[in-house]
Amino acid sequence: MFGGLAQGAAPALLGAAGVPVPEQVLWRPGTCDAPRNVKRLVAAGPVVAKPAADGSSMSVQRVDSFSQLARVATEVHSGQSELLVKPLLPGREFTVAVVGDQVLPVVEIELATPVFDDTAKYQPGAVGEVCPARISDDLTSRLQNLALRAHKALGFAQ
């Protein structure tokens, strides 16, 4: 996406447009212990954590415990960056591109790894892409509608 807006304002803009977004917490390790809402997310189940300043799938790490979170926080603190923490959402991975106001076919990303990080994204053979995705017409329509809403909410529409 596009830098700070992707990590900060984008979820609010998307939510206001009716696009579902998972809860996320920004935390600057080294300034304080993990905030209560970060601890709550980790306690509720696996999360993904990454430096907020990194690109979309750069440096994404699955975190299953507070000890793992502490390790990731130490790495991030050394770079003086904020840590973005979100729940790990189970399920299939899809992507939908929008060019201008034209919504393209839904693509399913078939992962060979548990997390779609930059290694999986760019390593040959780590993912498969199925286009068009083998999903119902109803799900196709819903995903394309959400993609177009997101595109417009973020100011990309012409």
Image: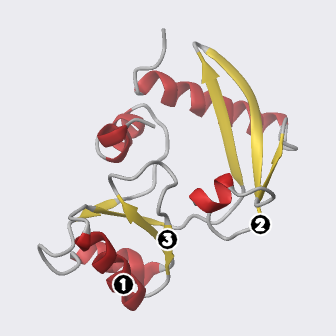
Which residue occupies the extreme bottom position in the image? 67
Q: Residue at x 42, y 26 (%)?
A: 153
Q: Earlier in the sequence, mark 3 or mark 2?
A: 3
Q: Residues within 10 Å of mark 3 (few under 14, many from 20)?
A: some
Per the image, label 1 sits on a secondary structure element best described as helix
Image location (x, y in percent) of residue 53: 32, 52
Please give the name of the residue rendered at 49% of the width and 38% of the height, measured from the top-left corner.
Answer: 19
Quadrant of the rendered image containing residue 145 = top right
Q: Position of residue 21 (x, y in %)?
A: 46, 49
Disc 1 and disc 3: Cα gap in Å? 11 Å
Point 62% across, 61% down: residue:
119
Task: Tally the marks.
Answer: 3
Q: Quadrant of residue 80?
A: bottom left
> Relative to residue 31, is residue 126 drawn left or right?
right
Q: In whole angstroms, how far apart are the C-alphas of marks 1 and 2?
A: 25 Å
Q: Amino acid at mark 1?
A: Arg
Task: Give me the residue at 32% from left, 38% from top.
Answer: 5
- The amino acid type of the residue labelled 2 equals Ala
Label 3 SS: strand
Q: Amino acid at mark 3?
A: Gln
| Quadrant of residue 23 within the rendered picture | bottom left
Q: Residue furthest top?
A: 158
Residue 112: image tag: 2
- The residue that disc 1 covers is 71
